C-alpha cells in the first residue's frame, strides 16, 4: 500500500473577523475536490471525531444548500446548514455556514485548492459577521481541558500583523 | 482572552509587543524605535499592562517594560485547541483519500 504523507494544519487569525486554515494533502486537487464534495464520504471526516455526522442533504451547485447533523452518543443532535455560492471544480468552493441553534450568525467559507507536484494545498478562509462570532467558533472547536502547547506565538503575531498593513 | 485580543488589535500595540519579544526596553527607546511620541507609547503600555501583557521593572533610574508570558501562552493554547480539532478532521480526510486511491488502483488493475 502506498504511504500517504501527513501534513500539519496551520491556523492563523488574519483579522478580528477571520480564520485562515491551511493543510496540504498528498493527492491531486481533482481527487481532493471530489472527495470533499462527495456526500457519501462526509460522515467519514466532517465534524469532531466524537460525534456521528449525518448528511441530511447536500446539493453541490451554486444556489444549492447543505445540511449536516452531528449526533452525540446520547442521541442529542445539532444541525449545521448553508448555501453554496460558488462551485468551481477543482479550484474553489464558496459557501455559507450556520449553526442552527445560533441561526442568523452566518459566516462565509472560501475553500481554495492549489495543486503542486501532485499534492494539494487547501486554504480554508472563513469570514464571520463579528469578532464575537469568530471567537465563539474557535471556542466551540475546543475539547476538554487545555493541553500543553508549543510556542506558536511568533506565527500568531505575524498573522495578526499582516492584516494591519 | 478577550482583553488580550483587544489589546493586540491596535497596530501600534502589536508593534510594541513584537519589539519587546526581542528584549525588555524603557519607554523612550520604544518610542524612538517605533517612531512614536513618548506619551502615546506610555498610553499603549498602560493598556498592554492592564491586559497583563507587559510588566514594568525598575532598573537603576529607568523603568523597563518587558513581556509577560502567561496571556500569550493562553492565547496560543486557545488557538492550538482549535487547530488540533481541524488537524484531526483532516487526518480522517487523509484516510478517505487513501481509501479512494486504493479503490481507484483496484479498478485500474481490473481494467488492464
Image (cartoon, coloured by chain):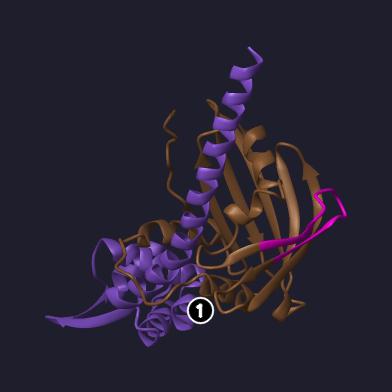
What is chain A's hue in the picture? brown
Query: To which chain does the residue with label 1 belong?
Result: B
Residue B96 in the image: state x and y as whole percent.
56, 44
**Residue at x 71% of width, y 80% of height:** A102
Above or below residue B104? Residue A80 is: below
Q: Which residue is denoted by mark 1 in the rendering?
A: B6
Q: Is residue A8 visible?
A: yes
Which tint was used for chain B? Answer: purple
Q: Residue at x 70, y 72 (%)?
A: A79
Residue A163 part of the magenta segment:
no
Residue at horizontal 63 percent and vertical 63 percent from the top: A53
Q: Nearer the viewer, residue B26 or A165?
A: A165
Q: Which residues are magenta?
A: A54-68
Asked whether residue A66 is drawn in magenta, I would say: yes
Residue A1 drawn at (x, y percent): 44, 29
Above or below, A97 against A30 in this view is below
Amino acid at each position: 500500500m502506498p504511504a500517504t504523507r501527513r501534513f500539519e494544519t496551520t491556523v492563523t487569525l488574519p483579522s478580528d473577523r477571520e480564520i485562515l486554515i491551511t493543510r496540504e494533502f498528498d493527492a491531486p486537487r481533482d481527487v481532493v475536490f471530489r472527495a470533499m464534495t462527495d456526500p457519501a464520504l462526509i460522515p467519514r471526516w466532517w465534524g469532531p471525531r466524537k460525534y456521528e455526522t449525518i448528511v441530511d442533504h447536500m446539493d453541490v451547485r451554486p444556489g444549492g444548500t447543505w445540511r449536516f447533523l452531528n449526533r452525540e452518543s446520547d442521541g442529542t443532535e445539532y444541525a449545521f446548514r448553508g448555501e453554496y455560492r460558488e462551485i468551481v471544480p477543482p479550484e474553489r468552493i464558496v459557501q455559507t455556514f450556520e449553526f442552527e441553534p445560533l441561526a442568523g450568525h452566518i459566516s462565509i467559507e472560501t475553500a481554495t485548492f492549489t495543486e503542486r507536484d501532485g499534492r494539494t494545498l487547501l486554504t480554508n478562509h472563513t469570514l464571520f459577521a463579528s469578532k464575537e462570532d469568530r471567537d465563539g467558533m474557535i471556542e466551540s472547536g475546543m475539547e476538554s481541558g487545555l493541553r500543553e502547547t508549543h510556542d506558536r506565538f511568533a506565527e500568531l503575531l505575524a498573522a495578526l500583523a499582516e492584516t494591519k498593513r | 482572552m478577550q482583553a488580550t485580543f483587544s489589546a493586540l488589535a491596535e497596530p501600534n500595540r502589536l508593534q510594541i509587543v513584537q519589539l519587546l519579544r526581542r528584549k525588555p526596553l524603557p519607554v523612550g527607546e520604544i518610542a524612538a524605535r517605533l517612531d512614536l511620541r513618548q506619551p502615546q507609547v506610555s498610553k499603549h503600555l498602560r493598556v498592554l499592562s492592564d491586559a497583563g501583557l507587559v510588566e514594568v521593572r525598575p532598573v537603576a533610574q529607568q523603568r523597563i517594560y518587558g513581556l509577560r508570558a502567561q496571556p500569550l501562552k493562553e492565547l496560543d493554547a486557545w488557538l492550538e485547541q482549535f487547530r488540533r480539532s481541524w488537524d484531526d478532521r483532516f487526518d480522517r480526510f487523509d484516510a478517505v483519500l487513501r481509501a479512494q486511491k486504493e479503490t481507484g488502483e483496484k479498478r485500474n488493475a481490473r481494467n488492464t
